[in-house]
Image (cartoon, grey):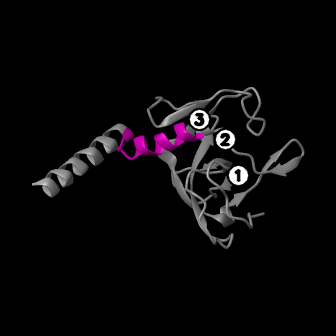
Amino acid sequence: MPITFTPELGQVLMCDFGPNSIPPEMSKIRHVVVVSPRRKGGSGWGSCIVVPFSTSVPEVVEAYHYRIQANKYRFFKRDTDVWAKGDMVGHVSFKRLDRVFCDGRYASPRLDPDDLAAIQRLVWEAMGRPIVETTEVIEEVVMEVVTELKG
């Protein structure tokens, strides 16, 4: 059943990527974490940006992959590491999302802030824009503007 609320940043949900995906697109129903901020005034029937999780170890572990050790969170498969796949980021309708079933009931858990921050960095890495480079570019632009204003 689709969610009827606007999910929050860091919230873990289930996403039905559907049977019509084309490899290597994400498929099946799987855990995702919301990486877009909650929009104010959302009706509950919008969309958000998510990063999916997989229990499959990447063939080659890249900077846009992040491992969460087994048993850290109750809502993931027990005794199995899960991998956030920053290169598989998606923009999905709330109609694809549902709450996680955990301990016999539906829940809307969140990742801890350190894991969420690491996953947000994965998205930057997957886009070829590491945070360090982005910060350096911003600093250069600011310095150019300051120089022009003084000049």
Disc 2 residue type (three-letter): Leu
The quarter of the rendered structure image containing the C terminus is bottom left
The quadrant holding residue 82 is top right
Secondary element under disc 2, as helix, strand or loop, is: loop
In this rendering, the answer to whether 74 lies above or below 144 is above
Residue holding disc 1:
14
Q: Earlier in the sequence, mark 3 or mark 1?
A: 1
Q: Report the mark closest to the observer, 3 or 1.
A: 3
2 or 1: tag closer to the N-terminus: 1
Crowd around label 2: few <14 · some 14–19 · many ≥20 (10 Å) = some
Please report contact status of discs 2 and 1: CB closer than 8 Å, yes or no. Answer: no
The one nearer the camera, 59 or 41, is 41
Is 116 rendered above or below residue 70? below
The reply to whether dot 3 and dot 1 touch (C-beta < 8 Å) is: no
Q: CA distance from mark 3 to mark 2?
A: 8 Å
Q: Residue at x 74, y 67 (%)?
A: 4
* Residue 85 point in image, percent of width and height: 53, 41
Amino acid at the residue labelled 3? Asp
State whether residue 95 is above or below residue 147.
below
Q: Nearer the viewer, residue 55 or 73?
A: 73
The quadrant holding residue 49 is bottom right
Task: Say which mark, if any, is on residue 114.
Answer: 3
Q: Which stretch is magenta?
A: 116-131
Q: Tag on residue 111?
A: 2
Magenta span: predominant SS is helix
